[in-house]
Amino acid sequence: MTVQQSSLRRSARSLRARQDVIVGLDIGTTKVCVLVAAPDERSNALTVLGVGTAENAGLARGIVVNIEKTVRAIEEAVEQAEAASGVAVSDVVVGIAGDHVQSFQSRNAIAISGFEREITAGDLERLLDDARTIALPSDRTIVHLFPQDYILDGQDGINDPIGMSGVRLEANVHIVTAARTAIDNLERCVERAGLHAADIVLQPVASSLAVLDSAEREVGVALIDIGGGTTDIAIFDEGVLRHTAMFAIAGNKVTDDIKKGLGIVHAQAEQIKIAYGHALQESILDDEVFMIPGINGRKPIEVSKSLLCQIIQPRMEEIFEFAFAEIRRSGYARELSAGIVLTGGCAQLRGAAELAERIFGMPVKVGVPSVGLDGGFAPEVQSPIYATAVGLVLFASQSQQRRSDMFGMSYRHMQRRQHRSRLGYRTVIERIKHFFEHL
Ligand SMILES: Nc1ncnc2c1ncn2[C@@H]1O[C@H](COP(=O)(O)OP(=O)(O)OP(=O)(O)O)[C@@H](O)[C@H]1O
Ligand SMILES: [Mg+2]
């Protein structure tokens, strides 16, 4: 279906176009979720107007591997969300993940000009522009820039330098990059579904906005979003995003292990994982035995919860150990006073938080999106599987209002500045040409 056909089909229904709505589009490995929300001036929260979800078979390990299937899932989820909200969806904020995403720290510096040498918000943007122009391989692009702390004339540890004066301002910046093809394919799917990607946001950054509160971010916390295809990590300390990481071992691997271990099909494995699965032997209270129908006339298989757990537990341990290695690598393992928050579909597995507590040796809780939402559909999204979709609308709403500079510079913000600086460059050349032409 072409973009035009797709938007014609949608405009055929009686939907209202609303300028103030914010739409989050979470394209996950197992499902696509569309969340339509609008700011409510009285409560200062976002009202959830509608939600749509559709199964997705177009992604593997967090990246698009089949455009047709992904587009179909997006369209189905959009249709549901439009029918629930009565609002036409066009601009969406999209999440990105996958093990092609990488992050590193950089140190950047600018000179402060002006008579007073007072630091302004414009100077901080210039500093991020300096980080933005870092040399990268041609197949990679920057998705986010997160300023960490500032150094003014050699004095370090400054969180907010605006209003201070000095001549040389430096910053430590956390840079998140992604494979250009992964972003291009994501944008292609969004466009082919008749939508426009207003911004692209790292999935764990979005999830963290939905499930963490500012106190947790202040004292130090690691968010681990275990979905179907990827496990995504975001570490905060002193209110600032310090580290991001992701790897492609998550719920689908657990399901695959059950499928192979018991010789059953994927759908059966998924079903019994959700109905009877445990991540920790000790969390099984009654060791119930259940039957799985045999495939193509074979005898039914008898399985106990503890046998199922023997398959699930090693894989969950592997996921938590990988996550712990990433947290240690970040250098923040000892700074996490608020411990670990688990979210994503796999956080719902029985015993997952207890197993994680043993491995991390820190307090672990399951995070559900509960921050800043109200309205009729708000209770519907209070599940870890909606953390990313909720976070995407929160990201868009908070960065629109520039309520926090925690967000640094986003993908589109960077593109707009790049475009402007290119235009600026052209006009200087044009001005010089004009000068010589008129001599
Ligand atoms: N109640 C449950 N118990 C155990 N596992 C569950 C439960 N509910 C969902 N899951 C698992 O969570 C995973 C899906 O989680 P989620 O919806 O967060 O993934 P996704 O966003 O589609 O994928 P990703 O973010 O990795 O691209 C699946 O592996 C599913 O089996
Ligand atoms: Mg997800």
Image: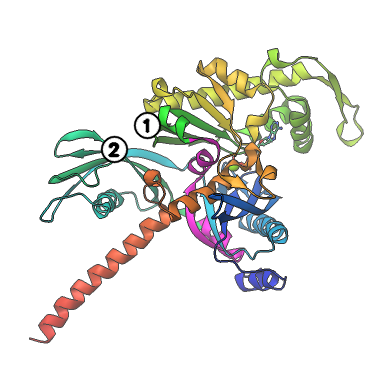
Task: Give the residue at x 69% y 21%.
Answer: 311
- Image coordinates for residue 10, horizontal then vertical, percent: 68, 69
| Rendered location of residue 429, percent (x, y) | 19, 73
The answer to whether residue 378 is left or right of residue 415 is right
Residue in the picture at 67% in, 72% down: 11
Residue at 67% across, 17% down? 280
Q: Who is closer to the viewer here, 3 or 125?
A: 125
* Residue sitting at the far top: 282
Amino acid type, residue under disc 1 in the picture:
Glu
Say how many tags the image has. Answer: 2
Position of the N terminus by quadrant: bottom right
Q: Is mark 1 within 8 Å of ligand 2?
A: no
Q: Quadrant of residue 86?
A: bottom right
Q: Earlier in the sequence, mark 2 or mark 1?
A: 2
- The region drawn magenta spans 185-213
Residue projecting furthest to the bottom: 438
The image's mark for residue 159 is 2
Instruction: Identify the residue at image location x=60%, y=33%.
Output: 250
Residue 122 picture location, percent across and down: 26, 55
**Mark 2 vs 1: CB contact within 8 A:** yes
Dot 2 amino acid type: Asn
Q: Residue furthest front?
A: 42
Question: Is residue 407 shown to the viewer in this render?
Answer: yes
Q: Secondary structure at mark 2?
A: loop
Secondary structure of the residue carrying tag 1 is: loop
Q: Which residue is mark 1?
A: 238
Residue 370, image x and y in percent? 59, 39
